[in-house]
Image (spheres, grey):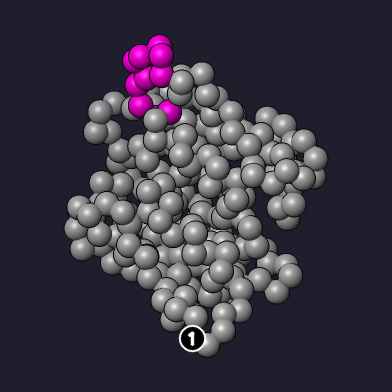
Amino acid sequence: MYELEVKVTKVLGACTAEPPMMPGDAFTVRDGDLRLPEGGYICMYALQSILPLITPKEREICDDQDWMWRVHHAQCPDPQGRVIFKIERSGKLEKGLRDAAEPGPEEVPVEAESPGGSAGGLRDLRVVVEEVTGECTSGMKPGDHFLLRSGRLYLPIGGHFCLYALHAVLPLLPAKQRPLEDGDWLKEDSHVICPDPAGNVIMRIEQMP
């Protein structure tokens, strides 16, 4: 498998994220985990366009007829602010190698929880791993989490979050940020399970005060 760097190379138009994505903004993917630099973030809507490319790009592409070998760029779905990302391999990982030590939730500085408030009346959300009833191949543990403020996704300093678990929860988040009427099933339903049946990672979506 390969470690990936996903970097903004150009912005055509005006990015509507606040603050907007800028050339040079980047995140890495390592062994199926999303990692952000300290103080960094990724626009949730741009991320949904990039995610389908990540899984194959982490792996060997042996057949020169495979179209994936020539795909290096993806763009945000917003036609008014076309943020263009380049996906590059930044190194090859040894089989089965994961970081020996990663900070637990209690080791994350408090200031990492407060990157700024949301605008337009949207609720800030926290998505936290509530329970792991199997064996998570990504090493997710209860307490691992990320924050969503407006359309920006933040990770705690030194933290990571499994891309496959993230993919499962992303579609619910824009609705959970907004007022929900009585009788809406999503108003009371705040749990999502990772697609991996071996891990059974259960996540809880919380509205921040």
Work out which quarter of the rendered image holds the N terminus and state it: top left
Q: Quadrant of residue 21?
A: top right
**Is 99 or 66 nearer to us in this picture?**
66
- Disc 1 on helix, strand or loop? loop
**Quarter of the figure with the C terminus:** bottom right
In this picture, residue 120 sits left or right of residue 191? right
The answer to which quarter of the image holds residue 2 is top left
**Which residue is at a point 69% across and 46% down the rendered structure image?**
78
Inspect this view and state whether residue 8 appears: no
Taking the magenta stretch, the answer to whether it contains residue 19 is no
Q: Is residue 21 left or right of residue 174?
A: right
| Residue at 41 percent of width and 14 percent of height | 65
Q: Which residues are magenta?
A: 57-66
x, y percent for residue 69? 46, 19
Residue for badge 1: 183
Q: Is residue 189 above or below residue 37?
A: below
- Pinpoint residue 174: horizontal percent, then vertical percent: 57, 64
**52 relative to 152, above or below:** above
Give the dominant element type of the magenta stretch: helix, strand or loop. Answer: loop
Depth check, front residue: 30 or 9: 9
Q: Residue at x 70, y 74 (%)?
A: 121
Q: Residue at x 69, y 39 (%)?
A: 83
